[in-house]
Image (spheres, helix red, strand yellow):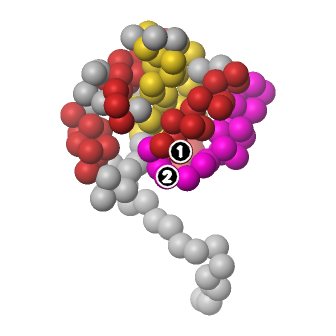
Amino acid sequence: MTVRPLQAGDLDAIVALDQKITGHSRRGFYEKRLKAMGNDASSFIALAAETGGQIKGFLMAYLLDGEFGGKSPVAVMDALGVDSRARGAGLARSLMSSLDQVLKTKGVKELQTQAALAEHDLVGFFIASGFQLAPRLALERSANQPVDF
C-alpha cells in the first residue's frame, strides 16, 4: 500500500468509492474540491491510498486561519473513505499518519472533523485516532426557516 497526493485524474475513482460507501454520488462536491485545490493547492490536502495501483482509500482536508476567532491555522478533514473490502488493513491509519506529517510541515497544530453520531465505526476510528469532543457547540438550522426576532 502506498499513500500519495490525490490528483485531478483520480476523480472517477474517488466518486465511485465514495458512492459505494454512502450509497449516492457526491460527484459535484468532489469536482468542486478538486477545482479549488487546483486554484489554491496550499490550502488543501488530499491523499489517496493505493494497493495494486487502485485507489482503496482517500482523505481530504482544508486549512483555515482565523475563522471563528482562532489565533492559529487549523485543518478541517471533511472527506475520508476506505473501500469496505480493504477495511482493517491500516489504510485509514496510514492516511491519517500522512495527513499528520503534512500538517506538521505546514505548522498546523489542530485537526477538526465531524461525524454523525450514528456512524459508530467512523466515530470509533476518530476516537482511536486521538480525536475528542470539541469544547464548542456546532449549531445548524434550515436556511428556509424564517427568522423572527
Tell me where residue 1 appears, x and y as whole percent: 39, 11
Mark sitting on residue 4: none
Q: Is residue 142 visible?
A: yes
**CB under 8 Å between discs 2 and 1:** yes
On screen, residue 129 versus residue 76, left or right, reads left
Q: How many numbered discs sit on the rendered protein?
A: 2
Q: Which residue is mark 1?
A: 19
Mark 2 lies on a secondary structure that is loop
Which residue is painted at 70% across and 24% down in the image?
8
Image: 122 above or below 8? below
Mark sitting on residue 23: 2
Q: Main secondary structure of the magenta part?
A: helix
Examine the structure image and report whether residue 34 is included in the region drawn in magenta: yes
**Range shown magenta:** 21-43
Image: 59 above or below 100? below
Distance between mark 2 and mark 1 Cα atoms: 5 Å
Q: Is residue 108 visible?
A: no
Examine the structure image and report whether residue 72 is included in the region drawn in magenta: no
Tell me where residue 117 appears, x and y as whole percent: 31, 58
Quarter of the image that includes the C terminus: bottom right
Which residue is painted at 47% across and 49% down in the image?
22
